[in-house]
Image (tube, coloured by chain):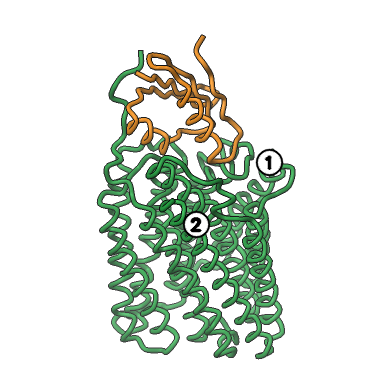
Chain colours: A orange, B green
Amino acid sequence: MKKTVDARGLEPPQPFERVMDALADLPKGESLLLLLDRMPHPLFRILDRDGYKYESRIRDDGVVEIDILNP
Amino acid sequence: MIPDGQTLSYDAAPAFSTPLRFFLTAPLFGAAAGAALLAAPELLDSRWTPGALAVTHLIAVGFMLTVMLGALFQVLPVVAGAVIPRSGPVATVVHVAMTTGALCLAWGLGSGSPAFLVPATVLLGGGLTLFVVAAFLGLRRIPVAQATPRDMRIALLGFAVAVALGITLALALGGRLDLPLLTVLKLHIGWALLGGSGVLLAAASWVVVPMFQITPNYPATLTRFWAMGTGAVLLVWSATVYGELGSAEFALSAALAALCALFAVSTLRLQRQSRRSVPDMTTRAFQLGMGSFIAGLACVLTAQQSEHQVWPLLAGILILHGGFVSVIVGMLYKIVPFLAWLHLTQDVGKAPNMKKLQPDSPIRRHLALHAVALAALLVAALVGNAWLIRLAGLLVVGEFAFLFANILKVLGNYRRAHAA
């Protein structure tokens, strides 16, 4: 089952720290689902730099979902 | 399946020094405003004295606009994913133009030397035009459905109108244009404080308040319509001012005040729903700011029905110092340590806790001094005693020096962590 990191309702930079901790433990070929209150533009820069693949979408209730794959 | 190509262009993402130079310069203008009060207390005799005009612009342009522009260089990428093209060189030119322009403007107004107003208008007009064009280029790919980037565009247009009116005023003061000064001045104040600064404050608040103060989001109806509605009413108000339609102008002023009060009350209500058990310093700064805005708006409306000189003075102090300065300082104390943390994480992979980069206790002391300075300014304006005005000026110098020192401390902590 895909790991989910729910970082909603936290003050910056805690959501960022939580996902970075989770990514450090993410094995190659696996992905995780990140839940946030808003689009994390600075995180995308880090994901690009470190070679992760990701896809983001906004749910009808406003929650931002991001699938992150460690290729 | 996750695609390969969902990336944004970050090549031109600004360095930490880009906003920081604005944040470090701005408090010096605030301190200069305090020093002017200290040196020449008679400038508070009315809002029309040359000294009062100089102090107003030291705060509005030298402090408020400088911080706002600096913040936008990094808020746009962080909040909207929009990057201002060639942000480094653009920021250098905008910073030099705005700061030297603000100095010329304050000196020209304060000393009654229209000759200084010409370079002031060229520098401020040129600097802000460059920024507005660059920001629109950065925002061109961002969907207009997002409230914050959409309303920031409206604010940029508001600033453009305010600057155009300011240039018109400077030309009229220099005898190059024959215009009704009071009419153009009213329009300039309306567009600068509400069309530009007020809308920008709201656009930033849509994101900053829920994000940093852990509140629910603003009501969707408010974020969707507030800025556009305010801009539309401001346009109609401008027509009534230009046409000298007294009663219609007052009715529309009241409508604008009601819109501002709606934003302020909504912010205060959201903050009461914060998940924090104890309000943090930024929340306190916002509470002081919103309360001051509401009181200032009441003074604006009273000033339109009364001949007494004190109401416009109180309105100016409450809206500029109590409202905008409080909220901008509150945002700075979140933005500066967050950007330091973000750049450390991006550059060296790890960063100290944000509380280590910016501890709470100096912020608390600074905000206490700011509140005392606000109270002293209000009492000094009411009483009109020269020594009270000097004391208020000294407190204003002290509060902006404190802000400067606190930002400098974050920079020192950032440099130490970067070198470690």
Could one spot residue B356 in this view of the protein?
yes
Q: Is residue B82 left or right of residue B71?
A: left
Query: Three-letter amino acid code at disc 2?
Result: Asn
Placement of B194 over or under B27, stated as above or below: above
Could one spot residue B235 in this view of the protein?
no
Instruction: Give B33 or B221, whichever is nearer the viewer.
Output: B33
Crowding at mark 2 (Cα within 10 Å: few <14, some 14-19, many 20+): some
**Sequence order check: which comes first, mark 1 or mark 2?**
1
What residue does disc 2 label?
A: B413
What residue does disc 1 label?
A: B274
Placement of B37 over or under B349, stated as above or below: below
Q: Which label sits in the foreground, 1 or 2?
A: 2
The quadrant of the image that shows the N terminus of chain B is: top left
Instruction: Give B65 or B384, whichever is nearer the viewer.
Output: B65
Placement of B373 over or under A51, stated as above or below: below
Query: Please, which chain is the residue tagged with disc 2 on?
Result: B
Image quadrant assignment for residue B258:
bottom right
